[in-house]
Image (cartoon, grey):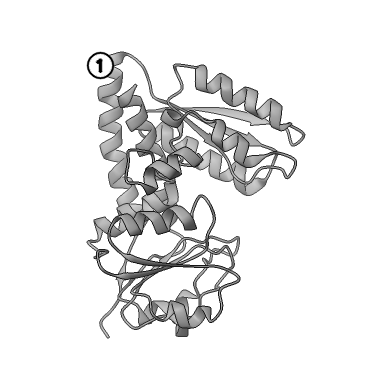
Amino acid sequence: MSQPLLLEGKSVAEAIEKELAARVARIKERSGRTPVLATILVGSDPASATYVRMKGNACRRVGMESLAVPLSEGTTTEALLARIDALNADASVNGILLQHPMPRAIDERACFDRIAIEKDVDGVTALGFGRMSLGERAYGSATPAGIMRLLDHYQVAIEGKHAVVVGRSPILGKPMAMMLLNRHATVTICHSRTKDLPQIVRQAEIVVAAVGRPRFVQGDWIKDGAVIVDAGYHPEKVGDVDLASAAPRSSAYTPVPGGVGPMTIAMLITQTVEAAEQA
């Protein structure tokens, strides 16, 4: 088998940022206003704090502003909803990111759904998911949207292919499946209770691993020539696929790190710039 293609997200994300910087400059020139992404972080989870910082850095690289909204671990659902309402009403804020996961005491779904649809640049609201699933205009969930952009950049064929998505989270697995379905793939969604999971993955021409377990998908689960998209990231700098054994069997794969991660942030910033252009 020939050498698999590396679906490298870092350079693609850098190219997207250059294009966004020019768009931000035009917004400032036309309106005299700088696009703003508000990032809400509840509690002090170190990984979440790192992600929020990376998103703030990306904003600055394209000339946008990042408004950090840190809230204590003891914040109530009511207090968080009130803060989201204030950001919805603030005309200077174009996008709102509510960092996941939140403390257990908070009603996460109620808080996501409070974000105004025109500021839901991370694609987390039920309304946004519904509109996207129906093929109507909405900001897609950032990680699946980034994966689609990456596949398109490398001209990976989607139409008519059998795609297996391992994972069913509301901000990754489910929207990923809908985006692939909207592009005419045949989609199977698997999860922790799926029977004969390795056998189902072996049928896939495109495998998206979004299960949140290190090296969960094994090399002998991969059909020769399949495309592997690893949407996982764990502290030991590995993803959800055992890439050492799986990548050699593939026709293309995303590295970890440097594959899906940079694309997630690039799409979040892209959608914030789009929101500013709409405003």
Looking at the image, residue 179 lies above or below residue 100: below
The N terminus appears in which quarter of the rendering?
A: bottom left
- Say what amino acid the circle numbered 1 marks: Arg
The image shows residue 144 at horizontal and vertical percentages of 41, 53
The image shows residue 63 at horizontal and vertical percentages of 36, 28
Farthest residue to the right: give it.
74
Image quadrant where residue 259 sits: bottom left
Between residues 73 and 26, which one lies in front from this camera angle?
A: 73
Q: How many marks?
A: 1
Looking at the image, residue 33 lies above or below residue 241: above
Taking the image as shown, residue 263 lies to the left or right of residue 81, namely left
Task: Report the residue at 49% width, 35% height from top.
Answer: 56
Farthest residue to the top: give it.
32
Looking at the image, residue 108 lies above or below residue 257: above
Task: Report the residue at 35% width, 33% height from top.
Answer: 62
Between residues 264 and 49, which one lies in front from this camera angle?
A: 264
Q: Tell me the crowding category of disc 1: few under 14, some 14 to 19, or many 20 or more residues within 10 angstroms, Cα based.
A: few
Image quadrant where residue 223 sits: bottom left
Task: Report the residue at 52% width, 31% height from top.
Answer: 115
The C terminus appears in which quarter of the rendering?
A: top left
Task: Report the residue at 55% width, 35% height from top.
Answer: 113
Looking at the image, residue 53 lies above or below residue 161: above
The image shows residue 19 at horizontal and vertical percentages of 26, 38
The image shows residue 154 at horizontal and vertical percentages of 25, 61
List the residue tagged with mark 1. Answer: 30
Q: Element type at marker 1?
A: helix
